[in-house]
Image (tube, helix red, strand yellow):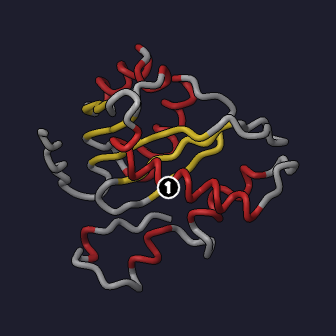
Amino acid sequence: MQRMPVADLSGPFSMLVVNAVGPLPVTERGNKYILVFVDYFTRWVEAFAVLRLDSVTFVEVMVNGVVARHGVPSRLLSDDGRNFTSEIAKSFYQTLGIKKLYGSAYHPQTQGLVERFNGTLMGMLKMHVSEAQTDWDLYCRGCYSPTGRLTTKRWATRRSSLSMGAIRCCR
């Protein structure tokens, strides 16, 4: 059996993995899905409640929620969902110089980092809201940042082999 080569990670947000969760009950703001991004280097998570899982929504979230805060990743790993493989998405990758990587069909372990977090996120959401509630989208950030602070704030209090210069603090 041939093993997958170890990913060459040059630093924070050099490689992201993205996946979608849903459909979930529609919220009062019309959201029905969650787009989840995880950085392979730092394990930083970004989750966004969205109305649709189309390519336009994906590109808007990627630009306004990820690229605007953390910069352009050099690589992006996802499954082969239409929102990640459309001409709009391909044009977006080409314009920003993102190398697009696709996971193996019917093998979610390829995106195991984000798949595992999706399970954690759903478990935490279930603790915060009942199935009848329509405000789960208000609790997304609280589920992966229970202190209300962003993930990087936790890095400052943990021992790490990374230098603090390698960790970006975003607010």
Image quadrant where residue 149 sits = bottom right
Residue 12 drawn above or below residue 150: above
Q: Which residue matches tag 1? A: 117
Q: Secondary structure at mark 1?
A: helix
In x, y percent, where is residue 136?
Answer: 75, 52
Disc 1 packing (10 Å; few <14; some 14–19; many ≥20)? some
Residue 169 drawn above or below residue 59: below
Q: Looking at this rendering, what residue extends furthest in the top direction? A: 87
Quadrant showing the N terminus: top left
Residue at (56% x, 53% y) in the render: 119
In x, y percent, where is residue 17?
Answer: 38, 44
Residue 163 drawn above or below residue 30: below
Depth check: give the residue in front, 135 or 62.
135
Count of number-bearing discs: 1
Depth check: give the residue in front, 128 or 89.
128
Residue at (43% x, 70% y) in the render: 152
Residue at (29% x, 59% y) in the render: 41
Residue at (72% x, 50% y) in the render: 137
In x, y percent, where is residue 55?
Answer: 51, 23
Image quadrant where residue 25 sits = top right
Left or right? Give the position of 81 relative to 42: right
In x, y percent, where is residue 111?
Answer: 37, 43
Amino acid type, residue under disc 1 in the picture: Phe
